[in-house]
Amino acid sequence: MKKIIPIEEGDYYLTPEGYRCFTEQYHLRRGYCCESGCRHCPYGYDRNKG
């Protein structure tokens, strides 16, 4: 079961379109890659390569 990570200041920003974009800080605290092709993925996942 995945643990819930509380949102802290600096964990995301709003894009011009109004979406939340999670930062590298958040991904590192979460501790794993979700393989969704996140913009700031610190784990090196590339959606195009799989």
Image (spheres, helix red, strand yellow):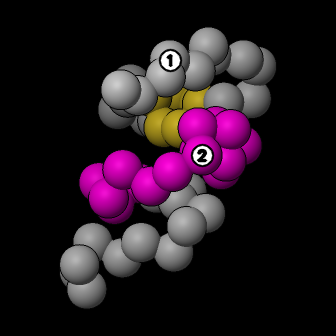
Given the current orientation, which residue lies at the most extreme front position?
1
Q: Is residue 23 left or right of residue 45?
A: right
Residue numbers of the magenta segment: 23-38
Comparing 43 with 37, the one in front is 43
Label 2 belongs to which residue? 31
| Amino acid of disc 1 | Ile
Residue 34 in magenta? yes
Label 1 belongs to which residue? 4
Query: Quadrant of the image for the C terminus?
Result: bottom left
> Rounded to the nearest whole Å, what is the CA distance between mark 1 and mark 2?
11 Å
Residue 3, x across and y down, in percent: 49, 22
Residue 24, x across and y down, in percent: 65, 50
Q: Is residue 8 above or below residue 21?
A: above
Element under disc 1:
loop
Q: Quadrant of residue 29?
A: top right
Q: Is residue 18 above or below residue 23?
A: above
| Amino acid of disc 2 | Gly
Residue 26, x across and y down, in percent: 64, 37
Residue 37, x across and y down, in percent: 34, 60
Q: Is residue 28 visible?
A: yes
